[in-house]
């Protein structure tokens, strides 16, 4: 078939176009060839743009750095954590809150005690059973609920009110009595401080949620007389957690004539350099910290203190208390130091003022004290039965006292360590444990296997192979090993044994005067390094023989154990003994208790014997499982009533 001439022309054009668009490889530039340099032109300056309107933002909270010369504030590690009054690793929660994972959280009101308390009328015209219950309601709603103490609480009854004069800052309140009649009063300057001024500002103005800038006073006689100016005042003392002055301690009504009366200047944001930044971002001056007064409004200025100023009392946890909190029969320090007779007596010599004495008004502190007393009575632990008679013959005690000892230990009296137990596995005793109350025993995870029928727990055992008259032997119903236990490294070396219940009862033990529970600590801040504690067990002695009677020894808590054990030292571990190796636990003591006693004589299970570098080896103290580190895990299995004495 012939092609038309115009077809040849079209074919030629297509081929030419194809070659032009796809040059041969020799025509394409190679990677190694130099391309012609481009002359860079100086970029033209951009046209100026209009400045955007600045956006005002709240600055992020700064970490306050304690200067090296500050003898009060610190340490820095504590300041970096920004603890507040809700940090229950350092302070107690009030009765209307409970400690959960290191933070105080609001209870449901019905969980408050109802015995020995006074009814409260609320702002919502509802009658609450107790001060604890109305505070729980305030805690959950974050609004002030309390009006006054009283059974009658109808809509016609006068309710508590507070007023803050915008010009003078003068504080005025309407305080109902038990029958609901209101009295117009000023607040006396006595005991008026920043903690109370914070409450007044927060209650009166929503924008002043950080409280007051200063707690002021006004000469009553300088005020312009008028018909609304009250002629009397009352003293008010606040802790700082209150949402209304109605929740604070109110007492000592007196004539205002000739007195200084309370006023407050509420806090406003400032762009000035901050001397101390509170956890809630409020700025205060440094000399307001560590004085026992809640200047911040969240108590963060009192939580990290090396020492206290202005007569305040320092707890071992580094918290400064108001001087009125010492010896007030309400324990504030974790170890009870503020209520220890010896410490209270020493502190009283330089105590500036006595505690407030409520007059015609019901004391909020007394109501809190009653609730705390009821809650603390729910769990009895840490106090041995000291009236128990040791009926061992003197000559027998003499013979046992000459036995070889557990690396510095001495024989215990037959019923001395009443929470110590022996864990028998198939008729062998290789481990100890500690009774923590109810149907629960704590021991080391490496001591047990998930086979309850293989174990029996022996209570009040003195001689390892011979029960005494007070010995009780209980089968094990369940073994609960920590889910993250690592046998090769002894990480999370902790286990719970649940005891079998007695027939037709919820109890697992018959009443026995020689058996007492040891308390479970909820915070790792309860006992500081160098605190003297005790260990006990039937482990091997210094010459390698197994002890025949229960032995015990004093040890010191040691910090910085990482330097001895390096990477083998894990979170949840702690050390005790002495670096010279004179006192230590040994094989056979595993699972046994390391017990520390607080200022009031209450004993806590601080550690569980876990592992170490041989026994009594110099430079390598014994390693223990730190019980407080596992409080939440323990509570999860045992429930609140079995373990929590103060933060329940």
Image: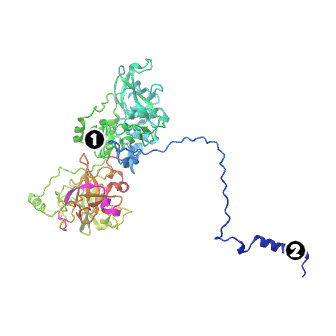
- As measured in the structure, the alpha-carbon distance from the residue carrying label 1 to the one carrying label 2 is 111 Å
Q: What range of the chain is rendered magenta? A: 544-569
Image location of residue 506, percent across then percent down: 31, 55
Q: Outermost residue, left direction? A: 395
Which one is nearer the viewer's eye here, 448 or 194? 194
Task: Name the spot of residue 167 as percent of width and height, x first.
Answer: 47, 25
**Which residue in the rendered view is the most extreme toward the bottom?**
1
Identity of the residue drawn at 45% across and 37% down: 210
The quarter of the displayed image where residue 398 is located: bottom left
Provide the secondary structure element on which disc 2 rests.
helix
Q: Residues within 10 Å of mark 2 (few under 14, many from 20)?
A: few
| Nearer to the camera, 226 or 352 | 352
Q: Mark 1 vs mark 2: which is more N-terminal? A: 2
- Asked if residue 211 can be seen in this view, the reply is yes
Residue 247 left/right relative to 383: right
In this rendering, does residue 648 appear at all?
no
- Say which residue label 1 marks: 338
Where is 554 relative to 92, above or below?
A: below
| Quarter of the picture holding the N terminus | bottom right
* Residue shown at the point (43%, 33%) measured from the top left: 213
Q: Nearer the viewer, mark 1 or mark 2?
A: 2
The kind of secondary structure element at disc 1 is helix
Q: Is residue 356 rendered to the left or right of residue 246?
A: left
Q: Is residue 469 left or right of residue 64?
A: left
Instruction: Residue 550: name its quadrant.
Output: bottom left
Residue that mark 2 sits on: 9
Identify the residue shown where x is 21% and y is 63%.
538
Residue 90: image location, x then y, percent: 34, 46
Q: Is residue 566 magenta?
A: yes
């Amino acid at each position: 078939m012939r092609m038309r001439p115009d077809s040849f022309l079209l074919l030629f054009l297509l081929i030419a176009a194809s070659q032009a668009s796809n040059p041969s490889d020799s025509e394409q530039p190679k990677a190694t060839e130099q391309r012609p340099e481009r002359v860079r032109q100086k970029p033209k300056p951009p046209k100026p743009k209009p400045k955007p309107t600045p956006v005002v933002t709240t600055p992020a909270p700064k970490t306050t750095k304690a200067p090296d010369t500050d003898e009060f504030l610190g340490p820095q590690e504590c300041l970096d954590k920004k603890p507040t009054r809700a940090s229950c690793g350092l302070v107690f929660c009030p009765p209307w809150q409970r400690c959960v994972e290191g933070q105080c959280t609001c209870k449901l009101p019905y969980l408050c005690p109802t015995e020995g308390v006074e009814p409260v009328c609320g702002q919502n015209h509802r009658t609450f059973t107790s001060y604890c219950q109305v505070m729980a309601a305030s805690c959950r709603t974050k609004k002030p609920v309390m009006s006054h103490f009283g059974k009658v609480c109808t809509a016609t009854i006068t309710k508590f009110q507070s007023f803050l004069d915008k010009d003078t800052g003068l504080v005025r309140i309407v305080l109902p009595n038990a029958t609901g009649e209101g009295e117009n009063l000023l607040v006396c300057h006595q005991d008026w401080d920043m903690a109370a001024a914070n409450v007044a500002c927060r209650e009166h103005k929503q924008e002043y949620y950080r409280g007051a800038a200063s707690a002021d006073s006004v000469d009553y006689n300088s005020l312009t007389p008028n018909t609304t100016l009250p002629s009397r005042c009352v003293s008010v003392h606040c802790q700082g957690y209150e949402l209304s002055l109605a929740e604070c301690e109110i007492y000592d009504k007196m004539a205002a004539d000739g007195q200084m009366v309370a006023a407050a200047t509420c806090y406003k944001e400032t762009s000035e350099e901050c001397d101390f930044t509170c956890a809630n971002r409020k700025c205060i001056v440094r000399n307001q910290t560590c004085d026992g007064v809640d200047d911040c409004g969240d108590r963060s200025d009192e939580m990290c203190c090396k020492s206290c100023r202005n007569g305040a009392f320092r707890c071992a946890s580094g918290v400064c208390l108001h001087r009125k909190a010492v010896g007030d029969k309400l324990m504030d320090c974790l170890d009870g130091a503020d209520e220890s007779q010896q410490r209270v007596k020493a502190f009283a010599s330089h105590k500036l003022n006595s505690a407030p004495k409520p007059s015609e008004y019901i004391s909020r502190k007394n109501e809190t004290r009653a609730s705390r007393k009821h809650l603390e009575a729910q769990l009895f632990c840490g106090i041995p039965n000291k009236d128990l008679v040791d009926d061992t013959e003197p000559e027998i005690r003499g013979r046992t006292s000459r036995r070889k000892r557990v690396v510095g230990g001495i024989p215990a009296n037959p019923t001395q360590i009443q929470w110590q137990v022996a864990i028998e596995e198939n008729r062998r005793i290789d481990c100890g444990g500690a009774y923590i109350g109810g149907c629960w025993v704590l021991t080391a995870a490496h001591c047990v296997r998930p086979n309850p029928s293989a174990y029996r727990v022996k209570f009040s055992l003195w001689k390892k192979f011979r029960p005494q008259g007070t010995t009780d032997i209980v089968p094990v119903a369940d073994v609960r090993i920590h889910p993250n236990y690592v046998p090769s490294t002894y990480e999370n070396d902790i286990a719970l044994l649940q005891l079998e219940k007695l027939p037709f009862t919820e109890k697992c033990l018959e009443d026995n005067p020689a058996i007492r529970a040891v308390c479970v600590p909820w915070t790792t801040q309860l006992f500081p390094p160098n605190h003297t504690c005790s260990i006990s067990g039937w482990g091997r002695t210094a010459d390698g023989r197994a002890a025949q009677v229960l032995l015990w020894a004093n040890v010191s808590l040691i910090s910085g154990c990482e330097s001895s054990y390096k990477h083998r030292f894990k979170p949840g571990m702690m050390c005790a003994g002495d670096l010279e190796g004179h006192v230590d636990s040994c094989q056979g003591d595993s699972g046994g208790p390391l017990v520390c006693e607080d200022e009031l004589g209450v004993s806590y299970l601080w550690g569980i014997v876990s592992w170490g570098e041989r026994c009594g080896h110099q430079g390598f103290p014994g390693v223990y499982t730190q019980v407080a580190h596992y409080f939440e895990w323990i509570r999860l299995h045992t429930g609140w009533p079995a373990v929590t004495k103060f933060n329940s």
